[in-house]
Amino acid sequence: MPEDPVGDRDTPYRPREGELLAALRSPRLLQLVQDGLRRIGAPPARVVRPGEALARLVGPGRQPLGLFCEAQPEAPGWTTLRAVAEDPFGDADVVLLGGDAGTDDPAAILSALERMTGRRASGEAAEVAALRLGLARGEVAMRYQPIVRIADRAPVGVEGLVRWLRPDGRQGTTPLGPDAFIPMAERGGLSVAVAQAVGGLVAGEMRALRPELALPVSINLPLEVMLRRDTVPWLARVLRQNRMRPEDLGIELTETTPVGDVTLLRRAVTRLREAGHAVWIDDITLDDRRDVLVDLPFSGLKLDRHLVGAMPSSRRARAEVERLAGMARRRGMLVTAEGVTGQGLWRALEARGVDHAQGFSVGRPLPAQALPAWASAWRASGPSLGRPSERSPGRSC
């Protein structure tokens, strides 16, 4: 199933009636599809199993407008469904998402949705203006995903993930994840505004949890914001206003922009570290070309969920995780694995020297007020939980 190309924006669009199907197991991929449908004013996709999707594509009656699916080789009907989707003479409009040559690019997904439904999303300039207004109105919100130490399952921090509660004029608001609007925000010159809004929200919400729960939190910053000399001062103001320490707030360098000047980045990381912040390289993938960054004074690196998820079936992925963990260990850095979804992955990561786990088997992204309940449930779920060590808070998030 080929990756769906981004459509021609000059093609005339005429709304079409019909149903969209989603044979997706990944909550994130399903959210991207449903978010895109909300943006273009279309009804949500109906979630189906591969066998049901196959019956709709080959059976009598009206075909669906299209199908979004991800590889599910163990599911009944998947092999035949894939053959139907790849038929060059077929009428099915099927888009493969996720791994196995699929896509998880929000722009490509939105383009496919526009083509299938004949509806158009509003132009990017209008979306940037809406986000700018939304920041002023407080329309952004945070969710926090827990991170634990693999060795003893102790909680060591949370990652703050931004959401945009975009007014849609029909159903109140449409919740959008970062993949759906952060790249647009960066192109539209809103990187600093988003970062400052996130910093203020995170500091206020995490402070409100104390002393019941005191864990360090990390936020994502794009390269543009990290390189600015005024970033450390405004972070300091936010922390001071909320009576928090720099050690309580870590920074994750996102991968949206390639690093052009390693020397400038070294200075930026050094400024943040000297101010007391832990600084992480985010989203290390299987084909990453950022080994040069490991020689900079980062606190640690985070393994992308696709790399982690490939470990059970890919010798190359297992070798890469072991190589990265060894590099980090030699430089005194910690390693966090994202996308940990089961005990098998947990054991494989532990065997290769990975320090921390983050993913649905640990905890889903939660509102701040739900974190104490998560901590209680996590303590009840297994042995040797304890408190974070003295070493962890300053270096784990």
Image: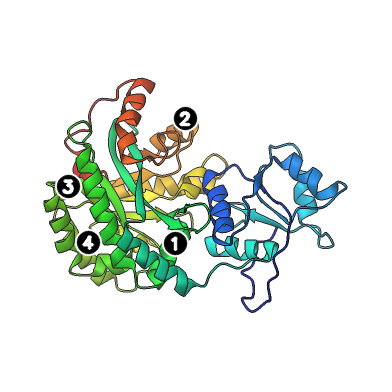
Sooner in the amino-acid sequence: mark 4 or mark 2: 4
Sooner in the amino-acid sequence: mark 3 or mark 4: 3
Sooner in the amino-acid sequence: mark 1 or mark 4: 1
Look at label 2 and name its amino acid: Gln
Q: Quadrant of the N terminus?
A: bottom right
In three-dimensional space, the C-alpha distance between marks 2 and 1, rounded to whole angstroms, equals 33 Å
Look at label 1 and name its amino acid: Phe
In three-dimensional space, the C-alpha distance between marks 3 and 2, rounded to whole angstroms, equals 30 Å
Q: Secondary structure at mark 2?
A: helix
**231 with respect to 112 (left or right):** left
Look at label 3 and name its amino acid: Glu
Look at label 4 and name its amino acid: Val
What's the residue at 51%, 43% (across, down)? 309
CA neighbours of label 2 inside 10 A, class few (<14), some (14 to 19), many (20+): few
Sooner in the amino-acid sequence: mark 3 or mark 1: 1
Circle 2 residue: 343
Task: Say which quarter of the image contains residue 282.
Answer: bottom left
In three-dimensional space, the C-alpha distance between marks 3 and 4, rounded to whole angstroms, equals 14 Å
3 or 1: mark nearer the eye: 1
Furthest-right residue in this view: 60
Circle 3 residue: 247
3 or 2: mark nearer the eye: 3
1 or 4: mark nearer the eye: 1
Circle 1 residue: 181
In three-dimensional space, the C-alpha distance between marks 3 and 1, rounded to whole angstroms, equals 29 Å
In three-dimensional space, the C-alpha distance between marks 1 and 4, rounded to whole angstroms, equals 26 Å
Q: From the top left corner, tell me how far across and down residue 50 is, in percent.
A: 72, 42
Residue 354 visible in the current orientation = no
Circle 4 residue: 269
